[in-house]
Amino acid sequence: MKRIFSCVVTASLALSLLAGCGASSAASSAASSAASSEAASSAASVVETAALPDGIYTAEFDTDSSMFHANEACDGKGTLTVENGQMTFHVSLVSKNVVNLYLGKAAEAEANASDWLQPTTDTVTYSDGTSEEVYGFDIPVSALDTDFDLAILGKKGKWYDHTVSVRDAVEQAAAETPADGTYTCEVTLEGGSGRATVESPAALTVADGKMTATIVWSSPNYDYMIVDSEKYLPTNTEGNSTFEIPVAALDTALDVTADTVAMSTPHEIEYTLTFASASLK
């Protein structure tokens, strides 16, 4: 936010001050100017450090490129999550051609591999009803409505500089639980290595106002899931691992843990599942 201060002094008043006050007037003016500068600096500091209240928002993702931007299915937007005053912006891109991001310049990226942002596998649904898997990223954001450097790594191993910003954040209204019945709902999986996926849309059942989703994994190697500290076992014995889990709310990331036995020893892996209310059928 910019504040513009204007001060108009008539010529006669200026002459009077110069004649009657001399050096004293100059000192007073300097003090006033210093106080104004300090106040302006303080205000700017408040603006820079102010954060949105904790919550989930929809925000615009502005970029300097027609090749690097939010997927068209997302209408140029992404999801901004504010937790404990820290902001993270999730954006689904147009394909899987961007494999890593780096907060900074391309020239600095190679030397800071531990800071590369890793992709998630997102499923987007277009206006014609078709779906596609693309890469998405969780981007830490220090300030809204402010340009920042974000380098991208393509499949060919070359880094490119870009300038982006996250703007016009609007808090998402809590989605209402649908009426009792059976539905399908698009679900987005995030977390893990990015290799695992779940079937989308997923079956969603609402009974007595409580939602239960049927989650079908892309492999048969998950032997249990944990949701809200409760363990859930597969509902099938053949084929890809299938679970029925409770869903607390739509349009809100649900923290889950899934245990895989695909490795030499079982591993619990943390994921999030987000069920899109707009896709309910």
Image: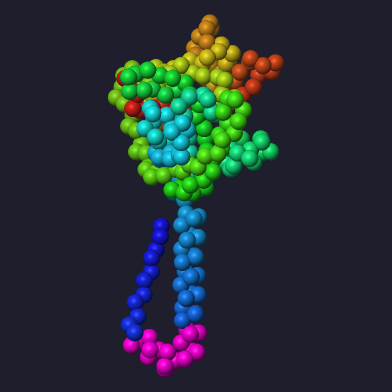
Was residue 232 drawn as part of the magenta stretch in this picture?
Answer: no
Q: Quadrant of the C terminus?
A: top left
Classify residue 211 by image quadrant: top left
What x and y, as percent, mark residue 194? 56, 24
Q: Identify the colour scheme used.
A: rainbow
Question: At 67% from the left edge and 16% from the top edge, which residue is drawn?
Answer: 263
Classify residue 62 by image quadrant: top left
Q: How many marks?
A: 0
What x and y, as percent, mark residue 105? 59, 42
For this rendering, which residue is in front, 157 or 174?
Answer: 157
Q: Residue furthest left?
A: 179
Question: At 34% from the left edge and 77% from the top edge, which residue is drawn?
Answer: 8
Left or right, 73 with respect to 109, comes to left
For this rendering, which residue is in front, 71 or 83?
Answer: 71
Question: At 40% from the left edge and 19% from the top edge, which residue is drawn?
Answer: 131
What x and y, as percent, mark residue 275? 41, 26
Is residue 82 at all visible to an observer of this figure?
A: no
Q: Which residues are magenta?
A: 12-28
Q: Quadrant of the N terminus?
A: bottom left
Was residue 16 drawn as part of the magenta stretch in this picture?
Answer: yes
Is residue 123 at all visible to an observer of this figure?
A: yes
For this rendering, which residue is in front, 215 or 73?
Answer: 73
Question: At 38% from the left edge and 45% from the top edge, which residue is drawn?
Answer: 168
Residue 64's place in the image compared with 280, above or below, is below
Left or right, 92 with respect to 267, comes to left
Q: Residue furthest top?
A: 238
For this rendering, which residue is in front, 3 or 19?
Answer: 19
What x and y, as percent, mark residue 253? 46, 32
Q: Residue furthest bottom?
A: 20
Majority SS type along the magenta span = helix
